[in-house]
Image (tube, grey):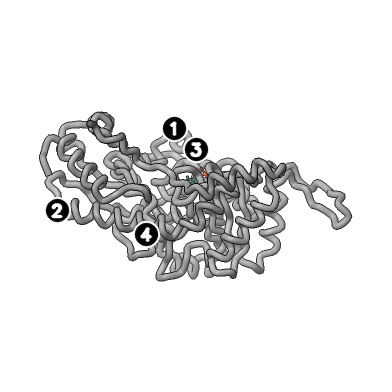
Amino acid sequence: MAEPFLPFTRPTFDEATLTGVVDTLRSGWVTSGPRVLELESALERYLGGDRRVRLFGHATGALEEALRVIGVGPGDEVVVPAMTFAASANVVLRVGATPVFVDVDLDTRNLGLDAVESVRTDKTRVVMPVHFAGLPVDLDPLHAWGRQHGICILEDAAHAIGARLAGRPIGSFGDLVCFSFHANKNMTTIEGGAISLPLDRTDWIDGLERLRFHGLRKAPDGSYDVERAAGKHNLSDVAARVGLGQLVHLDAFNRSRLHLAARYFERLQSNPWGLGLPARGDDGHAWHMFTVRIPFDRHGIDRAEFQARMRGLGIGVGMHYPALPPLALYRERCGWQPGQYPNAERIGRETVTLPLFPAMTPTDVDRVVDAIGQALGIPG
Ligand SMILES: *Cc1c(COP(=O)(O)O)cnc(C)c1O
C-alpha cells in the first residue's frame, strides 16, 4: 500500500486543545477576552517574566503597528533582508517608509552587521532582522550598533518562537520582537501573532494597544476617546485557547524539530547531489524549516519539475523564499540590478523546503532523502 502523503508541514493539536476550543465556544465569550489575557501572561512567563507581550491577529499586523509605534513613516528607511517573506518588506511600504535591502549569508540565510552598516544613512530608523528558519541572528553586535546610532531593532521572529541565542530566548530581550502563530509556524493560533516589548516601554505598550483596536483610549469610567484612525488587529479567545494548548508543547515540538534536523544532517552530510545544507546552530535553533539549495542547472531539471516529481513520490516540497528585490513591487519602488544581492538571488533560485514538523519520524526523513535520489535520478 502506498504510504500517506507527507506534507512539508502540518500542525499538531492534542485532545485537550480540541476540548478547550469547544469549551471556549460554549462559554459565550469567543472574541478577545480572558483567554487572550491568559495567553499573553503565559507567553510573558515563557519568555522569563521580564517582558510585556501583546497578541495580534497576525504577525504582519504586529510588524506594521510596531513600525507605527516607533514613529516610522514617509522619508524613513528600514533595513530588511533581501530574502525573507514578502510581509517583512510590505509593512515598511504600508507605513510610507522605504525598505532598504541587504544581502543575506548563503548558509545562515541571516543578515549581518557589516551589510547593515554599509547601507546606513541618516534616514535609517529601524533594522528588521529575520531569524531565518529559527536560527537566531547574532543580535548583540546589532543592538550595540543600534544604541550607538539611535536605530531601533525590530525583530521579525516569525520563525523563532522558542529559539534561544546563547541560551536566552528570542523575545526575552531587545526592542520589539514580533512572533507569528500562523498555522505553519512552530506554534499556532491558526492565524495570530504577538509582540514582545521591554517592561519599561509603557509608551510603546499603550500605543500598540490603541493601534490594535481602533485607536480607542478608555477612561476609568468606561467611556473612551478616539485619537487616531487605527486598524483592528485583536486576536479571538478561540484562537488564544488554541495557542494555550500549543504553548505547553512548544519546547517538545522544537526538540522534535531539532532531532529531525539532526537526521537530515546525518543522511545529507555527504550527498551525491551537491545539495547546499543550511547552517546548523546550537540546540537553541528552532528549526522552523529545513531548507536546502539544489544546483538545478547541474541536474538538468528545474524546481517546478523537482517539486512535481517529489509530489508524485508522496512528498510535499515548499519554497521559502524567492529573493524580494527582483519581484515587481520592490523592483519598481527600490530598483534592482541582477546580481546586486548574489546570495539572496542564488538562494531564491535554488532553495527547496523539505518536510519538517513535530509529528514526523526519522523514518519519514529517510523517505524524503530516498525520494530526492529518485527525483534527481541519482540514487543516494
Ligand atoms: C509568516 C511570516 C510573517 C507573517 O506572519 P503572519 O502571522 O502570517 O502575518 C512575517 N515574516 C516572516 C518571515 C514569516 O515567515
Local crowd at mark 3 within 10 Å, few (<14), some, or many (≥20)? few
Circle 4: residue type: Arg
Q: Are dots 2 and 1 in contact, CB under 8 Å?
A: no
Q: Which marked residue is nearer to the observer: mark 3 or mark 1? A: 1
Q: Nearer the viewer, residue 158 or 31?
A: 31
Circle 2: residue type: Ser
Which numbered disc flags the more N-terminal residue, 2 or 1?
2
Q: Are dots 4 and 2 in contact, CB under 8 Å?
A: no
Q: Which residue is mark 2?
A: 270
Q: Residue 83: where, in percent of width, then height?
A: 39, 46
Which numbered disc flags the more N-terminal residue, 2 or 3?
2
**Inter-mark Cα distance, 2 to 3:** 42 Å
Which numbered disc flags the more N-terminal residue, 3 or 1?
1
Q: Which marked residue is nearer to the observer: mark 4 or mark 1? A: 4
Mark 2: C-beta under 8 Å from nearest atom of ligand 1: no
Local crowd at mark 2 within 10 Å, few (<14), some, or many (≥20)? few
Mark 2, secondary structure of its residue: loop
Q: Are dots 2 and 3 in contact, CB under 8 Å?
A: no
Which numbered disc flags the more N-terminal residue, 4 or 2?
4
Which numbered disc flags the more N-terminal residue, 4 or 1?
4
Residue appearing at x 29%, y 57% in the figure: 279
Q: Which residue is mark 1?
A: 328
Q: Residue 284: where, in percent of width, then height?
A: 38, 64
Task: Give the image quarter of residue 207.
Answer: bottom right
Q: Which marked residue is nearer to the observer: mark 2 or mark 1? A: 2
Q: Nearer the viewer, residue 79 or 42?
A: 42
Which quarter of the rendering shows the C terminus?
top left
Residue appearing at x 35%, y 54% in the figure: 257
Mark 4, secondary structure of its residue: helix
Q: Which residue is mark 3?
A: 333
Which numbered disc flags the more N-terminal residue, 4 or 3?
4
